[in-house]
Amino acid sequence: ETAQRGLVPSTLMAPLSATDEVTVAAALHSIPQLAQLDPGQLEITRLGGLTNLVYRVVPPDGAPLCLRVPGEGTSAYIDRDAERVNMIAAANAGVAPAVLHFGIDGVVLMPLLPGETMSPSVFATKAGAIARAGAALRRLHASGEVFAAKFELFEQIDKYLKELGDDAELPEGYHETLETAQGVRLALAARLLPTAPCHCDPLCENFIDDDGRGCMWIVDFEYGGMNDPMWDLGDFCVEAALDAERERELFAAYFGPEAPTAVERGRVVLYKAMCDLLWTLWGLLQHKNGNPAEDFWSYSLERFARCQNLMAEPTFAEYVA
């Protein structure tokens, strides 16, 4: 599974196509810091992106920058005004890069972070990386910053289903599984935790390990919101494919000497399955919109199958009860 909902590794650079050149020229013209520069003076390479277009831009006498241009159709399910607030708050929390420009069109300019873009395989092999990710999430959650939007799991599911439409083709059994998940909804509501500023989309590739500073940066706050912080932990466990030993490493970095409570651990287990239930629909939206970056139908089937498997485990039922 390689699908990402935002930025991509800075090592995946490619020359600009003719379409890219038009896109970049229009974006640069909208940014006061770069509008007066001749594009020929800039070193520009495509970094990639599945739903957005991301570029590395190097001015003639400056540090490398990251230019993000929103993908076509993303305004239907991304609140760019909220994203702007979230990005600035995350930067204030010390876990994300500064926002140099955020236009009303969603074009973003920020420093290009040094370090290694993470992946499941890198998290599995790089010493200390999981602990640094856990510490970064804890710093964000405990920052006291306030994100603009609320992220509520079942509201997001309803939103995506509405966007897909009544005639959408869903994986077999999706509605039945969603009905079963109403028990999860009740279990979560029975013991609410205080909300915190959460990333809500903790893909491995949204973490940049800065060896020079010994810290982990977090990028791409399109889906960020005030949420149960256990969502970020549960979703990260799934995205990074953490085994029990690595989960303990994550929890030790996040919770410190105090182990997670039974309630916190239970919510992590529930969110592991629920994130797949949600992101199945995200993949179907990409499939519906004809996003050519990946086979999103297969992506959605894989995520939904994993959701069903997790929900079928005996421990899952114990935490729902």
Image (cartoon, rainbow, N blue to C red):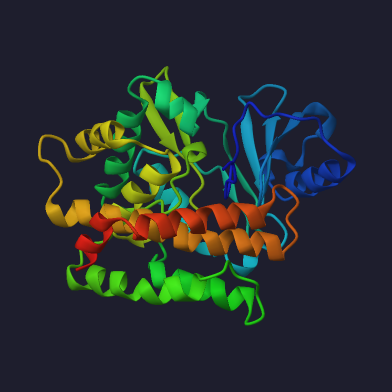
Residue drawn at (43%, 60%), measured in percent from left and top?
A: 308
Q: Nearer the viewer, residue 37 or 237?
A: 237
Asked if one can make out residue 84 in the rendered structure from this viewpoint, the answer is no
As drawn, the residue found furthest toward the bottom would be 166
Q: Is residue 300 above or below residue 253?
A: below
Q: Is residue 205 above or below residue 60?
A: below
Relative horizontal placement of residue 45, taking residue 127 as reference (left or right): right
Q: Quadrant of the C terminus?
A: bottom left
Q: Nearer the viewer, residue 61 or 105?
A: 105
Q: Quadrant of the N terminus?
A: top right
Give residue 230's position: percent from left, percent from top: 28, 53
Relative horizontal placement of residue 132, taking residue 318 as reference (left or right): right
Give residue 30's position: percent from left, percent from top: 72, 51
Residue drawn at (51%, 70%), measured in percent from left and top?
A: 174
Q: Is residue 76 above or below residue 252?
A: below
State which quadrant residue 271 falls in.
Answer: bottom left
**How many numbered marks does the figure carry?**
0
Q: Nearer the viewer, residue 209 or 264?
A: 264
Give residue 254's position: percent from left, percent from top: 23, 39
As drawn, the residue found furthest toward the right would be 18
Residue drawn at (42%, 19%), measured in percent from left and top?
A: 211
Asked if one can make out residue 57 in the rendered structure from this viewpoint, the answer is yes
Q: Is residue 45 above or below residue 313?
A: above
Give residue 39's position: percent from left, percent from top: 82, 34
